[in-house]
């Protein structure tokens, strides 16, 4: 069958959808014809690209709902409406991704007029089995990991077990994406493991992965890195694991094998590693094997906060890990969360001063209580919601989603701007196009006018510094825009 997969434009712009690439590759290996429209990392001409691809006459249209956000849901519905208006052939519409898995039955109830099926959890085999079944006219109720409408009832099949042997999955073939085709993938996205066994109250991952961690072998990981360099022309690799070093021996083996095989591509760990898993040997091998940067989730620098957030490690463990990495010569950035349970403006100021002593780049985000997390339940009992946690403004991580009597909205915003202006130290960051919470804006008005208003209100003594950083940030944006125009011209010229 012909399967068209679509990654809609979302909050997380600019990155290739790894999960969708795995689904597409498994489908292709089963003999189906697959195309992927990537509206997320290659923005522009979406309607034209979709209209032209509908001329390919797909039998199935699958849409990724990632991240779980209101704009992503709305974008997916608009795509279905466009297809039905411009594509007269009856075809099946299938949704999948975090936005489905978060609340499957609710998603299907709210989208019963848009999607025939929705895939719950890891989608590689569920989607492939569904396509095979639709081709042969089989019974969809026998396929684990689905939710769909049958008359007035919503049917959810049994849960599909998590994939244990990740090495058996094929390497994702990004050449199926219209944003890639036969061109280079300069920054190659890769995952070496799935899931996380820990219980952080603010993290949605454990709700989606069942706190089960599964890993690829060192050989499989290094093989894919080699493919990234030789077949995709990649000059760097970004490893998006939630916990790269849970198995320290495996992490060490990856580093050693990468060195032995001469796979010299530099790599980054932007989603972080657990600091309590870091030892001197691992840190040294990370540097020698080409690791150019590691993110560490400190969250808050008050030891008492760690009693409430269930990280499974102590603050002193985190600090020790950061110092070991720095001593080994591995660049470190830390991520911080403003507004965790039992924190106040004063305790957050203490965190700022403490982070300053570590001499690293830090990124400060306002806490978001995602549905189904323990933080969400805590806010229901101890605070008040000010925004929908899944709204566009909330997912910028610079909007106050909730407050408490001890930490008001005004104080949270004041802390956010104070931290990101005076305690961020971007000059110590390890890659240029880093995420900067202060400057994640959707329009030029927000960048130039709104940002000055908010800085003046909450941190007016930082206006000069804000101006310099804004100029630097905008220069990076111009460079990216020029690269995008060149990329677009190359696509049009094919």
Image: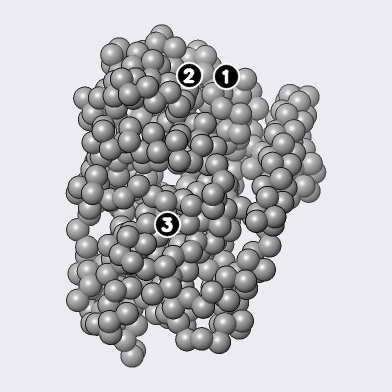
Q: How is the image coloured?
A: one colour
Circle 2/circle 1 CB separation < 8 Å: yes
Query: Does residue 45 appear in this view?
Result: yes
The vertical placement of 472 against 378, above or below, is: above
Picture coordinates of residue 339, whole percent (x, y)? 48, 39
Left or right: where does residue 18 sit relative to residue 136?
right
Q: Earlier in the sequence, mark 2 or mark 1?
A: 2
Give how far apart the Cα atoms at labels 3 and 1 are: 34 Å
The answer to which image quadrant residue 201 occupies is top left
Give how far apart the Cα atoms at labels 2 and 1 are: 8 Å
Task: Tell me the residue that label 2 is attached to.
Answer: 331
Secondary structure under tag 1 reads helix
Picture coordinates of residue 112, whole percent (x, y)? 43, 80
Task: Tell me the residue that label 3 is attached to.
Answer: 20
Q: The N terminus lies in which quarter of the figure?
A: bottom left
Give how far apart the Cα atoms at labels 3 and 2 are: 31 Å
Task: Tell me the residue that label 1 is attached to.
Answer: 428
**Residue under the point 24% across and 44% down:** 167
């Amino acid at each position: 069958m012909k399967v068209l997969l679509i990654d809609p434009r979302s909050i997380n712009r600019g990155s290739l959808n790894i999960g969708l690439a795995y689904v597409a590759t498994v489908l292709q290996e089963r003999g189906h014809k697959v195309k992927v429209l990537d509206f997320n990392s290659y923005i522009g001409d979406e309607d034209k690209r979709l209209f032209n691809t509908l001329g390919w006459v797909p039998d199935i249209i699958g849409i990724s709902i990632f991240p779980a956000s209101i704009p992503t849901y709305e974008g997916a519905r608009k795509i279905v409406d466009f297809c039905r208006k411009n594509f007269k052939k009856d075809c099946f519409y299938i949704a999948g991704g975090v936005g489905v898995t978060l609340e499957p039955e609710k998603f299907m109830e709210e989208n019963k007029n848009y999607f025939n099926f929705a895939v719950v959890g890891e989608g590689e085999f569920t989607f492939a089995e569904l396509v095979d079944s639709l081709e042969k006219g089989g019974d969809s109720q026998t396929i684990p990991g689905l939710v769909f409408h049958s008359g007035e009832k919503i049917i959810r099949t049994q849960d599909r077990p998590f994939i244990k042997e990740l090495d058996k999955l094929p390497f994702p073939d990004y050449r199926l994406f219209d944003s890639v085709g036969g061109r280079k993938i300069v920054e190659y996205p890769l995952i070496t493991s799935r899931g996380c066994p820990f219980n952080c109250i603010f993290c949605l991952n454990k709700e989606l992965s069942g706190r089960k961690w599964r890993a690829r072998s060192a050989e499989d990981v290094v093989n894919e890195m080699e493919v990234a360099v030789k077949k995709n022309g990649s000059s760097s690799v970004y490893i998006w694991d939630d916990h790269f070093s849970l198995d320290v021996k495996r992490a060490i083996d990856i580093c050693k094998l990468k060195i032995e095989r001469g796979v010299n591509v530099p790599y980054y760990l932007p989603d972080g590693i657990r600091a309590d898993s870091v030892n001197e040997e691992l840190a040294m091998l990370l540097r020698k094997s080409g690791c150019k940067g590691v993110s560490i989730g400190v969250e808050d620098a008050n030891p008492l906060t760690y009693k409430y957030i269930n990280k499974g490690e102590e603050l002193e463990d985190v600090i020790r890990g950061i110092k070991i990495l720095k001593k080994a010569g591995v660049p470190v950035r830390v991520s911080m969360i403003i507004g965790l349970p039992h924190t106040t403006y004063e305790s957050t100021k203490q965190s700022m001063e403490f982070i300053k002593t570590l001499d690293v780049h830090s990124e400060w985000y306002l806490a978001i209580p995602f549905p189904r997390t323990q933080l969400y339940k805590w806010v229901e009992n101890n605070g008040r919601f000010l925004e929908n946690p899944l709204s566009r403004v909330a997912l910028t991580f610079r909007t106050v989603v909730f407050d408490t009597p001890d930490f008001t909205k005004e104080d949270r915003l004041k802390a956010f701007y104070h931290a990101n202006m005076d305690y961020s130290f971007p000059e110590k960051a390890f890659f240029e196009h880093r995420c900067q919470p202060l400057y994640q804006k959707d329009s030029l008005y927000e960048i130039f006018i709104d940002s000055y208003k908010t800085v003046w209100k909450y941190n007016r003594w930082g206006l000069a510094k804000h101006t310099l950083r804004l100029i630097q940030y905008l220069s990076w944006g111009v460079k990216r825009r020029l690269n995008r125009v060149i990329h677009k011209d190359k696509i049009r010229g094919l």
